[in-house]
Amino acid sequence: MLRYTPPVDDMAFALFDVFDAEAEWARLPAFADMDEAVAKAVLAEAGKLAAETLLPSYQSSDAEGARWRDGEVVAPAGFRAAFDGLVKGGWLGVSGNPHHGGQGLPKMLTVLVEEMFWAANTNLYLYGALTTGAAICIDAHADAALKRRYLPRLYSGEWTGAMALTEPHAGTDLGLIRTRAEPLADGTYAITGNKIFITSGEHDLADNIVHLVLAKLPDAPPGSRGISLFLVPKYRPSDDAADGPDAAGSVRNGFVSRSIEHKMGIRGSATSAIEYDAAVGHLVGEPNRGLACMFTMMNHARVSVGIQGLGLAELGYQNAAAYARERPQGRAPSGPRDQNAEADSILVHPDVRRMLLAQRAFTEGGRAFAAYVGLLLDRAEHTADEVERDAAQVAADLLTPVAKAFLTDRAMDCALLAQQTFGGHGYIAEHGMEQIVRDVRISQIYEGTNGVQALDFTARKVLRDRGQALRRLLNDLRGETVPDEFRAPLHAALDATERAAERIATAARADPAAPGAASVEFLELAGLAIYAWLWARMAQVVTKADAAQRARHEGKLDVARFFYAKLLPKTVALECAIQAGAAPVMALPEELF
């Protein structure tokens, strides 16, 4: 049986010790009422809900799975009660627009709330995360009437959201989609087509499900330039926005779930194939600008999926560490630690400690990274200074693919290490480790595979502006005051990242395959360098703290030293791989595969 203790103290450390969130919020008028005490209360309540309400149905939902029958989807037992906990607490609207019923809390805080929900029950929280993403897109791009009608219901959790992008023949290449949108006399559109891999597209946890669907108008230009975005509710509410699907005047819309996928993991989350048959939809944003609108939701989802990986990595670490403390096996290399026992705990063995320290280095580093990305998003949306706002948005855009791919790749590493810590017991379902491995795996795939994220980071975010945004970030990180023992290796990692970017840019001028051939290694190199900065910053906080603060965060320096000694040196190998260029990847003729 999996156990989970919300890491509220470490979250508070990231917010208030590492990034001085209270001072950050004080200068942003939108967060004038937010302080450390309020934030800690929010974290405590979210953690309680996660551990007591969401966690109990996590393992059972994997065994049961979502169930489909004649177009209807039933969520696993216990999900309705757990989802009602999210709804009654207003947790789906914590970062939402206050003008439409959201709470408007800082992203810097809500990413950590999300981590606990993802950790406790990824299967369940997928229904909530898609709702939050849909609300963000509607708030950013829909007209006033749609916002008034849909946002309060999404924030409250009475209605949930889904995004419908993928078609059987068109995955990442959305320009190939065939779903059609025919204009109707009343200004709405008839949506016809088939979509697959629609997370939360059909279920029984809410009164209504709001789909955001990519489709093409009759006169649309070819490719991705001709994609529009439409809001398509499962039930069309009457003119009274308070009416739900069972109220007089509401109408069942023209789409249905034709099946749900049988998956390797996240089995409690319903993933539907949806058929739209003249379903009535509303245009969101401008015609043929749907992909840009949808990217608002997708970018949010990519950060959220990164946090999903982080949460599952934390869940795995906590259970692996507890198992290691309790499992007697063998003796310490230096001799028996407990003379009265038949064996010492496996924590005495160097390899077990290596596995646990690697997990902790990536989860605690990832938590600080999540808070930093949240800080950038808050500045980009709320600071009054236009120069600072633009700089924060550029930095957030640069780091979004890193947040998605590096967090989830390291989460997969951590999940496997957690399973390995259990030995053979990690392969047995009752301990939950094999489920964590299976559930983490999807985070590397959906919302754009991590290979696509790496190419986006390399070719679009770094090379497109000739590396200017990356150089600004690296220069900012170089300017940090860090403990002497970390300064040289930190600067070496930052310098290696900059050299690699310049090498790829030079190679790309002669070989179009160069960015793609190096992108995965380049993103990992950048991720390790950023984590090196974060760990140096955390170490600086601890070394300058008083005795009481150091006691609260005992072990941070040891974990920082482990990261620098055992994990950061991989940057040397990554830079060598990047220097090899595209030839080793592209030389083998296609017919020999």
Image: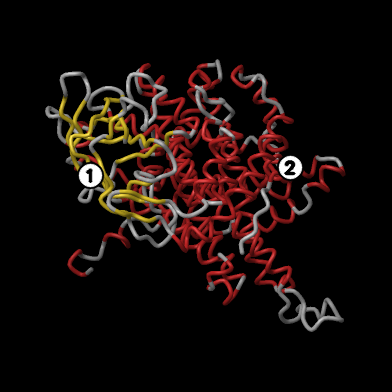
505 to the left or right of 357: left
Q: Residue at x 35, y 45 (%)?
A: 202
Q: Residue beneath label 1, please? A: 275
Residue 49 at x, y percent in the picture: 63, 44
Mark pair 2, 1: CA separation = 55 Å
Specify the farthest residue to the front. 248
Say which of 370 and 537 sits in front: 370
Q: Earlier in the sequence, mark 2 or mark 1?
A: 1
Q: Is residue 520 toward the left or the right of residue 418 in the image?
A: left
Instruction: Classify mark 2: residues with Cα within 10 Å, few (<14), some (14-19) or many (20+).
Output: some
310 or 432, nearer to the observer: 432
Quadrant (top left, top right, bottom left, bottom right) of the N terminus: bottom right
Image colouring: secondary structure
For label 2, the SS is helix
What residue is rendered at 40% in x and 55% in y? 66
Answer whether residue 70 is visible to the viewer in this image. Answer: yes
Q: Is residue 116 left or right of residue 337?
A: left
Q: Secondary structure at mark 1?
A: strand
Question: Quadrant location of residue 191?
Answer: top left
Most extreme residue toward the left, as rendered? 219
Amino acid at the residue labelled 2: Gln
Foreground: 579 or 574?
A: 574
How many labels were placed on the picture?
2
What residue type is disc 1 on? Answer: Glu
- Residue located beneath label 2 in the image: 540
| Mark 1 surroundings within 10 Å by alpha-carbon count, few (fewer than 14), some (14 through 19), many (20 or more) | many
Percent position of residue 160, x then y: 42, 37
The percent coordinates of residue 381 (x first, y second) are 51, 23
Examine the rendered structure and indicate whether residue 365 appears above or below residue 44.
below
Q: Is residue 192 above or below residue 559?
A: above
**Which residue is at a point 74% across and 73% down the rendered structure image?**
348
